[in-house]
Image (spheres, rainbow, N blue to C red):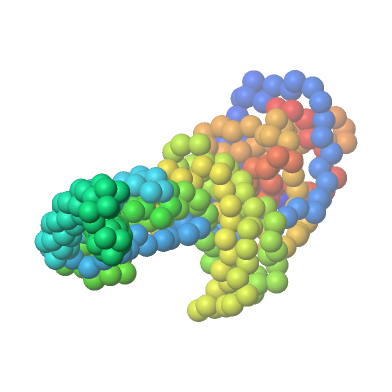
Amino acid sequence: MRLTGLILPLALATLTLPATAFAQTGGTYRVTEQQIVDRKAVFATVESVDVVSARARIGGTIGELRVDEGHAVAAGDILAVVVDDRIAPQIGAANGEVSALESQLAQARIDLTRAQDLFDRGIFPQARLDEARTGVSVLEGQLAAARQNRNVLVQQSRQGDVLAPASGRVLQVPVTSGSVVLPGEAVAMIASELYLLRLRLPERHARSIREGDAVMVDVSDLTGDVSPSGYIRQVYPQVEDGRVIADAVVEGLGSYFVGERVRVYVAVDERAAILVPARYLANRYGVDYARLQHADGSHSDIVVQRGLDSADGVEILGGLAAGDLLVQP
């Protein structure tokens, strides 16, 4: 059905356009109906593939907080330092014990050397030499144990460094400097560097989407190098609040906020449509026109209702019918 009943001013504009507005440049196109993918527009949100927690390994006080929401971090970065006031005195006591044992061991080795010399000259009995050797061995064992205990305390103090478990951006920091935290408590939430679009479609489309299906992204309101297309990565097998949830992979989402809304078009069915190459359309005063060639060779310019653009052409929602012959305006 032709759009001859469009708003009267538009029709008048069609009739009064000067002939030079649509000068023929040659070439014709026969209008036909084609099967095209019917796409539904839905809003999707930018989500991180993984959100991980950076947790305190020991209990204590946040002595230093090095990150805030939005900061980019790399795996292994120190995000905060938890200080346990009980560890420092214990390390000091362990250092004192090690020093004392080192002094005792040094003296015991001097005594052993003297005892060996006296034994060699026949002055010292074997029992006294064995006693000196045993004393050195005992002190060596005690010193090794004291050093190991000190190393454990030092390592425990280093457990106060809260490390980033993965590279990404910090989403939340639920603590402040000076806060008291328990072992295992979350200090920061980190979104991994891999981002995707989470779609929520009406339940009736549950069986229409498949993993690997293409999606189109409306990038008109976005900045950066976001790809205008992507694909369905996963379709979740559960319906929530009458919606089917699916994840789509699109390149270039890393520079956007988690939770930001983006309009996408998802293929849900196929339908018959009229597609016309863009070169057979013209626009004047905000109105789209096509030039129709009649059987007697005459031409007339008609108003058309333009739909979405695609790689195959421009969809015409009204104004043309299958079999019409167009010339380039």
- Compared with residue 303, is residue 178 higher up or lower down, i.e. above or below? below
x and y, in percent, of residue 18 in the image: 61, 25
The residue nearer to you, when weighing 269 against 49, is 49
x and y, in percent, of residue 324 in the image: 82, 42
Residue at x 65%, y 37% (from the top left corner):
289
Q: Quadrant of the N terminus?
A: bottom right
Q: Quadrant of residue 326?
A: top right
**Numbered disc total:** 0
The residue nearer to you, when weighing 293 against 166, is 166
The residue nearer to you, when weighing 308 against 84, is 84
x and y, in percent, of residue 152 in the image: 29, 61
Residue that extends furthest to the front in the rendered view of this protein: 122
- Does residue 269 appear to the left or right of 244 in the view shown? right
Residue at x 84%, y 39% (from the top left corner):
30
Q: Quadrant of residue 171?
A: bottom left
x and y, in percent, of residue 10 in the image: 56, 42
Asked whether residue 16 appears in the rendered view, the answer is no
Residue at x 59%, y 77% (from the top left corner):
238
Asked whether residue 150 appears in the rendered view, the answer is yes
- Does residue 231 appear to the left or right of 96 in the view shown? right
The residue nearer to you, when weighing 59 against 175, is 59
Q: Quadrant of residue 127?
A: bottom left
Q: Quadrant of the C terminus?
A: top right
- Does residue 269 appear to the left or right of 293 in the view shown? left
Residue at x 85%, y 29% (from the top left corner):
297
